[in-house]
Amino acid sequence: MANLLWLQGGACSGNTMSFLNAEEPSACDLVTDFGINVLWHPSLGMELGDNLQQMLRDCISGKIKLDIFVFEGTVVQAPDGTGEWNRFAGRPMKDWVRELSDVADFVVGLGDCATWGGIPATAPNPTDSVGLQFLKRDHGGFLGKGFTSKAGLPVINVPGCPCHPDWVTQILVGVATGHAGDLTLDEFQRPKTFFQSFTQTGCTRNMHFAYKVSATEFGQRKGCLFYDLGCRGPMTHSPCNRILWNRQSSKTRAGMPCMGCTEPEFPFFDLAPGTVFKTQTVMGVPKDLPEGVDKKGYVKLTGAAKAAAPEWAEQDIFVV
Amino acid sequence: MSEARVSSEQQAADKALLEHLESRLAGGLEPEIEPRAYSHEEVLEVVGRLQKLDSNDYDAKLVVGGFTLEPYGVGEDEQACDTCMYYQVHREFCELPELMLPVGPKWSCRLWRI
């Protein structure tokens, strides 16, 4: 039996909603099949008031063993570093986060806000929000660069806005069943099993990407969304087209550009007008090219791809 | 959005229109070749003007789009239609929603994007 505690800071509850929709395994499976004891969760917890405070104190004192501490949302530090703008159970949430992180075997940051600040930490960041161990790309965050949980791992970051439900439950099962040692993390402490490949990996529009055929409207079935509509699939690490959403689809499959929500810079360009759903260019060339590709290579590739494009690539092949 | 296949009638219409547009450009029409629409604001400005045009006002589309019969730029910076993302190679057609007109592979316009 592994005790799991889930708290929520500067958050929209999106990751909670996602978690509750998990299927493989489901949130219930975690309890019935994988021996996870949910001590408390913002949407599932039974304890209130003094009872909840006592439970949290018992975790900190060691009376209750805390195996997995899950945090969703940013750590709010405003005003003036006090954290008073996000009080929980009688004190600033940030104080609970610090003390619970110190006693947990594993700390898991869920969603962009907990991992690197996400939308709340976007300039001007009025809540002085940070992620658990990152602020955007800067290593450190609330717990500090050198933080490791009692099991010796840094915060396990599962980003996304929200993160996919199965990324959450599969990581929790892995940790709870003693397989944390099998996890390899990337430079942003994301499990490589999910975040080594790209959103583009498995995208149904890859043939249009290859032949440089652009989608020009949302929802259009033909064409790649990277060239004009701001899709960040070729630069974003996520398995969105390998582990489908609702077992059915993904943003790009449905004709919506990937917004790169598993990367530290999300939301890109601080959401400045004209930067959302529009590929940013410098003299007509995308500002952000597919990972590992330079401008010279991209220009050459485009010329060759356009010249080689078969006629069908320019037509709508998804006819009824 | 393009049809599953371009009909022979459409191909003939495209060809006739292409020849007409070419003659207009060669015959002294003065497109706004510069400034190029490199920034987002510049793109919005040009596209906004195109959106106000009648869809059959091809002269105005050529002028506002800044079309030329030769590529703009040279070498690595060449901006020819046949490398633009909006260009359909086989139909020789620009499918930018605000333009939607037949163009030659070595033409160019100031909304070129790769």
Image (tube, helix red, strand yellow):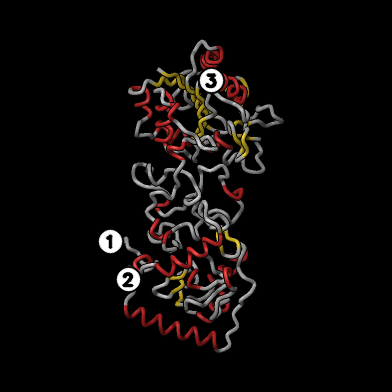
Q: Amino acid at mark 2?
A: Arg
B80 up-or-down from A225: above or below: below
Left or right of residue B59: residue A194: left
Q: CA distance from mark 3 to mark 1?
A: 57 Å
Q: Amino acid at mark 1?
A: Val
A79 or B65, nearer to the observer: B65
Q: Quadrant of residue A137?
A: top right
Image quadrant in which the N terminus of chain A is located: top left
Which element type, helix, strand or loop, lies under badge 3? loop
A121 up-or-down from A275: above or below: above
Residue B112 position, x and y percent, is 54, 69
Mark 2 neighbour class, 10 Å CA radius: few under 14, some 14 to 19, many 20 or more: few
- Residue that sits furthest to the left in the current view: A320
Which element type, helix, strand or loop, lies under badge 1? loop
Q: CA distance from mark 3 to mark 2?
A: 63 Å
Q: Are marks 3 and 1 on the same chain?
A: yes
Residue A82 position, x and y percent, is 68, 27
Instruction: Identify residue for label 3.
Output: A150
Instruction: Identify residue for label 1.
Output: A320
Image quadrant in which the C terminus of chain A is located: bottom left
Kindly tell me whether residue A73 is visible in this rendering.
yes
Residue beneath the point at 39% across and 23% down = A177
Residue A178 position, x and y percent, is 41, 22
Residue beneath the point at 51% across and 15% down = A55
Instruction: Identify residue for label 2.
Output: B5
Left or right of residue A125: residue A9: left
Q: Which disc, if any, is residue B89? A: none
